Amino acid sequence: MRLEILNSGYRPGTKLLFAVIRLFSGQPVPDAAKLVFYRPDFYGTQAKKFTHEAMRGPSAWSVGDRELMAAYVSKVNGSAFCIGAHTATAAQAYQDGAKVQAVLANLESAPIQEPLRATLRMLGKLTAEGEVSADDIREVLSAGVSPQQIEDALAVCVAFNTTDRLADAFGFEVLSAEGFEAGAKYLLKRGYR
Amino acid sequence: MPADDKERATYRALVDRVLTGEGRASEEQRAQAFSNDGLAQPLDALIDKVASRPAQVTDADFAAAKASGFSEDQLFELVLCAAIGQSARLYEAGLAALAEATGSGETG
């Protein structure tokens, strides 16, 4: 990562934890996981709470749907690390990698339900343009999405607009396919806490 | 929508922490990074990229900011503030549009 403190500035206990994770997973600790351990009182502790609530808290959206939103927002931002991580996680959650790839390739023709498609379209516009109108929201509502689902989707969008920026600014190392698969398995088992 | 929505409350706590909690960068600098407004060069170039086009951040942007006197811990904080600030603006815009569309009169 571009700041040396994020590569080597961890406490001894944290370094030991990273070594144990490497030993058991056979993969390097992803930079996204490392970041939340650096001065966790400043960012990591509170960020994990928000991201976990958005991605795994109570919602009418499935875990797969929310991971797909994370992958899609990351695609709009062009954030390579987060695209890889959340494409793998959505594919494992759905047990359907082809569906995830289809959404990222062409949202309009992908084989998904209209409520999810309309929601992704709105999140993409918000991410790319920085704003959405009430009419944009009404289109999502008319596709059958509830106001609470829209609010839940906005929280996912916000969490990944933050993480995408950090991944690109700090320079998270893009993992191998095996590394992303191992990370996805962890995120589905344990979440973001 | 419940005014005490847990996601929003948790996000507000994150914003409050990075802006006003203990830190190595001043609260004024953190607020400027959050709003992407008012910072001097070369830090401003780095922070603006984080907010607007993060994929274009380079090693040279960090090197220039460090050479102007910022420590790595200060840059860690200011980059976080910039990323969270842009995301907070998206959250506010989305929630405001939702409130208008549903006539709830609530803007988050």
Image (spheres, rainbow, N blue to C red):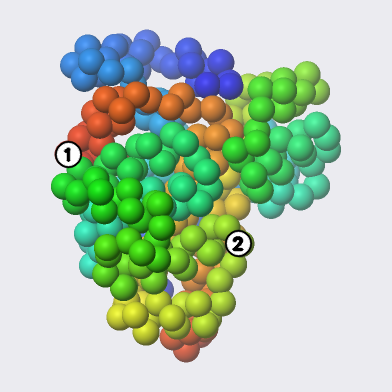
Question: Does any portion of residue A64 appear in the rendered image?
Answer: yes
| Residue A136 x/y as whole percent | 50, 77
Q: CA distance from mark 2 to mark 1?
A: 33 Å
Residue at the image point whose x is 38% and y is 81% from the top: A141
The residue identified by callout 2 is A130
| Residue A79 x/y as whole percent | 50, 40
Residue at the image point whose x is 48% and y is 16% from the top: A7
Residue B52 drawn above or below residue A154: above
| Residue A126 x/y as whole percent | 54, 63
- Nearer mark to the viewer, of 2 and 1: 2
The label shown at residue A189 is 1
Q: Residues within 10 Å of mark 2 (few under 14, many from 20)?
A: some
Q: Name the kind of residue labelled 1 in the image.
A: Lys
Residue sitting at the far bottom: B103
Question: Does any portion of residue A155 appear in the rendered image?
Answer: no
- All told, the count of numbered labels is 2
Q: Name the kind of residue labelled 2 in the image.
A: Gly
Residue A35 drawn above or below residue B92: above
Residue sitting at the far front: A109
The reply to whether dot 2 and dot 1 touch (C-beta < 8 Å) is no
Report the chain holding disc 2: A
Residue at the image point whose x is 43% and y is 27% from the top: A174
Report the chain holding disc 1: A
- In the picture, measured across the screen, residue A27 lies left or right of residue A94, that is right
| Residue A150 x/y as whole percent | 38, 71
Task: Please report whichever mark, 2 or 1, sits nearer to the chain's N-terminal start.
Answer: 2
The label shown at residue B11 is none
Residue at the image point whose x is 31% and y is 28% from the top: A177
Quarter occupied by the C terminus of chain A: top left
Q: Secondary structure at mark 1?
A: helix
Q: Secondary structure at mark 2?
A: loop
Residue B41 drawn above or below residue B107: above
